[in-house]
Image: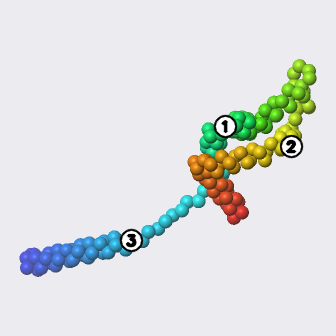
Amino acid sequence: MINARKYGFHAITFWALLLALAASFQVTAKNDKENVEQVEILGQKTTPQLKKAFDDQRFEFLELYNSINDVAKFDVVCRYQKPIGSNIARKSCEPRYVKDFRAMKVQSSSTSPGIDFNRLPSDDHVRFLTSNTRPEAFEHVAALIATHPELFDSFEKLDALHQRIKQHEENN
């Protein structure tokens, strides 16, 4: 037989204990909310991810630069090219003055119908022959960056990514 008195005492003790436990959890939870420890987790990008972000920012910068630039020869012309032996096109950019000079050299090197590939100028040759225009182009870009805050901000982002890539490569 069940002793009702004993059973009732255990039930009351059980509920009192449960109530005390619940109250202590509530007090503990309130204290935890006041003293919450914050943990910050910083993700680290891999070098290829940083280089991809740099390329994306570079193309964004060039697009903004071209929209602000008013000197046609200093525009930067970008196009997709497939490297020899690859079917994957990559975006490459060069100043218009280099592109125009290359086109002029190709036309002048071809005296007969068709193109003589042996007489075409190499990229190094074109770069050397346009080197006198490069300082003027750099000064023009620097002046635009200095006078247009949005171009300056874009350049700062580009530089920050470049610094992170350099630091990441030095650490690895």
Secondary structure, mark 2, is helix
135 left or right of 153 in image: right
* Residue in the picture at 89% in, 25% down: 110
* Residue in the picture at 74% in, 47% down: 138
Number of the label disc, if any, that sits on residue 36: 3
Secondary structure, mark 3, is loop
Residue 134 seen in this snapshot: yes
Q: Do the residues labelled 3 and 2 touch (CB within 8 Å)?
A: no
**Residue beneath label 2, please?**
128
**Residue beneath label 1, please?**
70
Q: Look at label 2 and name its amino acid.
A: Phe
Q: Up-down: is 3 above or below 104?
A: below
Query: What is the image's colouring?
Result: rainbow
* Residue in the picture at 62% in, 40% down: 68
- Choose top left, top right, bottom left or bottom right for residue 89: top right
Label 2 neighbour load within 10 Å: few <14, some 14-19, many 20+: few
Cα distance, mark 3 to mark 2? 63 Å
- Choose top left, top right, bottom left or bottom right for residue 33: bottom left
- In the image, residue 35 lies at what x, y percent? 37, 74
Label 3 neighbour load within 10 Å: few <14, some 14-19, many 20+: few
Q: Look at label 1 and name its amino acid.
A: Asp
